[in-house]
Amino acid sequence: MHPGDLIGVLVAGGFFAFWDAFGIGANDVANSFANSVAARTITLKQACAIAVFTEFGGAVLMGAETTAAIKNSIIDVKLWKAVPEQLMFGFMCALVASSFWVILASRFGFPVSTTHSIVGAIAGVGIAKFGFSAINSAEFWKIVLSWVVSPGVAGVLATVFYLITKYTVLNAKNSLQRGLNFIPVFFMFTISLCMFFVINKAPKGIDLSKAANQTPENWTKVLLISFVGGGVAVGLYVWLFIVPYFRRLLIDEETLSWYHMFYIRCVPTQPKNENMEAWLEGHADKIKKVDEEYAAVETPGIENAEHVEGEDKPIVAEKKKKNWRVLGKYALEGRQARQQTEYLFSYLQVATAAFASFAHGSNDVANAAGPFSAMLTIYDTAAIPGKNVPVPFGLLAGMGIAIDLGLVLYGYNIMKVLGNHITYQSPSRGFNMELGASFTVIVASFLGLPVSTTHCITGATVAVGLCNGEFASINWRMVVWIIFSWVITLPITASIAGLLFAFKYGW
């Protein structure tokens, strides 16, 4: 095997790896921000601006673990020991199949799993060459099992988080005051969790990762660095600046701008907002007026678009149903207090959406980087890739950039489908949905399992939607449609990749 003979395959592999990452950004990144956009916490443009940094950070800092799983765990690469050039071509075929299907699905608004796409494509190449014996059964079924388990785990976690929030904050007589008390705790928990996994799984060149050796002493160091260095610092900042900002804005009803929160202690007393209720109504793009259990319920559907970004793109739709429940005991004051609490949670939801995006970048970058990393190894060494071959930092960074481009240029297609199309959204609900899903995804990245972020956010969304005991609060037609798109993805990409490989090398 002469390297010059494979340069064309390598270039083609890089091209389709880029497009696969682009498709990941267009399809899967919507999982992280669809709930925030649906709850009108942020606009699509704001979601893209945040994701540019969080997706890239997750890909670079934690993407190597799941990349190793994608390139080594699905098929038995040892079978290609005598013909590594065929394995290299097979990985290129897998990238062609995955990128084609994911971008096609994004075009028609199918929220497919990009993890399904690449796993199915790689399996299809192995079957085309050696039959089903090429599948690394134990690892393959572990990955498939994680797809089944992860929605349930995300749903359970999101339910627990939501019920804690509901009974400690939302149902309190003074929910706004309780929310102000809990904001530093929520931020501290989220940031500590994120920092723990980043430090423990940072790229090998970063010194902090040396503290992550699996010994009790070093685990204690990582926990302390994460909790004290990250969580407590952020929680303290929130307590000193963010909480006073909201107290003056929502309780004292001062007229403040958003940027005042960064130096609120230096801002003199501002004129009082004479009509707080009207002000809250005017911020309908950031809050939902009343949560489902306190107001007339509108069960979402897939028709009659409602705008989430000015008058530009109809992304969120709500289909009215006849299950109206109006609780008369909530008068105007209670309704206004509820609006204020939801507005408070809108800022928390931005933090969890960023966390979810970071988790997504850490897990799903492997879908594009894994096969191409294996191709680079084969090209450089003329041998099959080993399990411990490091993933180049530049490759992770490049795939992270491609993911960002996919979201910015094409991500709105999938945001039409998720969010309010599954169940009712509000900032308090979306906050817990995203926290449960991102917790599940980032733990999976920590364990090296390439789970589907689509599965996790869907499981969390359905679970929180059912928390009020209303089966009709879920748009089951949309859920079934999403599950159907998951089911057909694996055989479609397996068939495309297998046929491409067989066209050159035969069965």
Image (cartoon, rainbow, N blue to C red):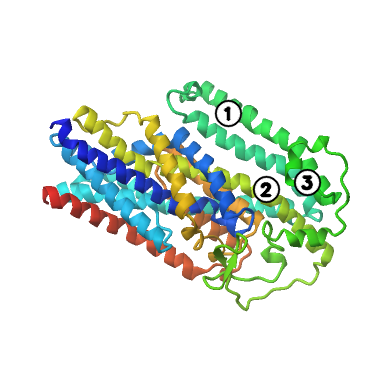
Q: Up-down: is 373 above or below 492?
A: above
Q: Residue at x 21, y 36 (%)?
A: 7
Q: Amino acid at mark 1?
A: Leu
Query: Which structural element holds mark 1?
Result: helix
Q: Is residue 406 left or right of residue 502?
A: right
What residue would you read off at disc 2?
Answer: 347
What residue would you read off at disc 1?
Answer: 223
Q: Amino acid at mark 2?
A: Tyr
Q: Amino acid at mark 3?
A: Phe
Q: Residue at x 57, y 73 (%)?
A: 319
The answer to the question of whether label 3 and label 2 lie on touching residues, with beta carbons closer than 8 A, is: no
Residue 249, position as x, y percentages in the image: 81, 48
- Quarter assignment of residue 448: top left
Q: Up-down: is 11 above or below 106?
A: above
The answer to the question of whether label 1 and label 2 lie on touching residues, with beta carbons closer than 8 A, is: no
Comparing labels 1 and 2, the label whose residue is closer to the camera: 2
Measured Cα–Cα span from mark 1 to mark 2: 26 Å
What residue would you read off at disc 3?
Answer: 246
Q: Is residue 371 left or right of residue 130?
A: right
- Quarter assignment of residue 355: top right
Comparing labels 3 and 1, the label whose residue is closer to the camera: 3
